[in-house]
Amino acid sequence: MSVLDWLKQPEAPPAEARLEAAVVAALRTVFDPEIPVNIYDLGLVYALDVGADGQVRIRMTLTAPACPVAQTFPAKVAEVVRQVEGVTEVAVDLVWEPRWTREMMSEAARLQLGLL
């Protein structure tokens, strides 16, 4: 391979971006207990911070404050994310503001639920 060919190759994404993509993929395996859509596309994840050191902080909500899994669901999410290679620590903060609405769903989620 010539130097010019090497220079034309796209750069690999930084480790932090790859780790974030892996965390998002893991979040997409966790489904809301009442709606058959994963929590990421459902719009329940409000913020995702992934540090270069593997620390992950997730700020998320549930579809309703009275959700029967409100006490256990954050731990389940943390457990799934903790399985991602490169993750060293996970913190999940459950918040209720802003209140979740259907508009927070991805287009794919709305399509899956027949809302488009």
Image: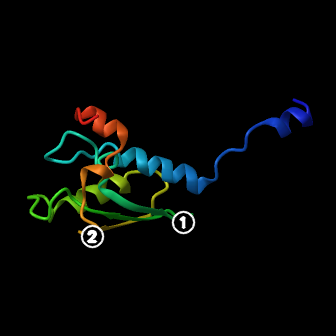
Q: Residue at x 46, y 51 (%)?
A: 85
Instruction: Tell me which amino acid carries mark 1.
Output: Asp
Q: How crowded is mark 1: few (under 14 residues within 10 Å), some or many (20 or more)?
A: few
Judge depth for marks 1 and 2 and give the one in front.
2
* Of the pair 7 and 66, the residue shown nearer to us: 66
Q: How crowded is mark 2: few (under 14 residues within 10 Å), some or many (20 or more)?
A: few
Dot 2: element: loop
Q: Which residue is drawn at 8% across and 58% down?
A: 68
* 104 to 72, vertically: above or below: above
Q: In which quarter of the image is residue 107?
A: top left
Q: Residue 21 carries which label?
A: none
Label 1, on which residue? 53
Colouring convention used in this rendered image of the protein: rainbow
Q: Quadrant of residue 31?
A: top left
Give x and y (percent) for residue 81: 36, 54
* Of the pair 64 and 3, the residue shown nearer to us: 64
Question: Marks 1 and 2, Cα distance to the nearest angstrom?
Answer: 28 Å
Give x and y (percent) for residue 27: 35, 49
22 with respect to 73 (left or right): right
Give the quarter of the figure containing the C terminus: top left
Mark 1 vs mark 2: which is more N-terminal? 1
Q: How many labels does the image show?
A: 2
Instruction: Tell me which amino acid carries mark 2.
Output: Glu
Label 2, on which residue? 97
Give x and y (percent) for residue 63: 19, 56
Give the quarter of the figure containing the N terminus: top right
Dot 1: element: loop
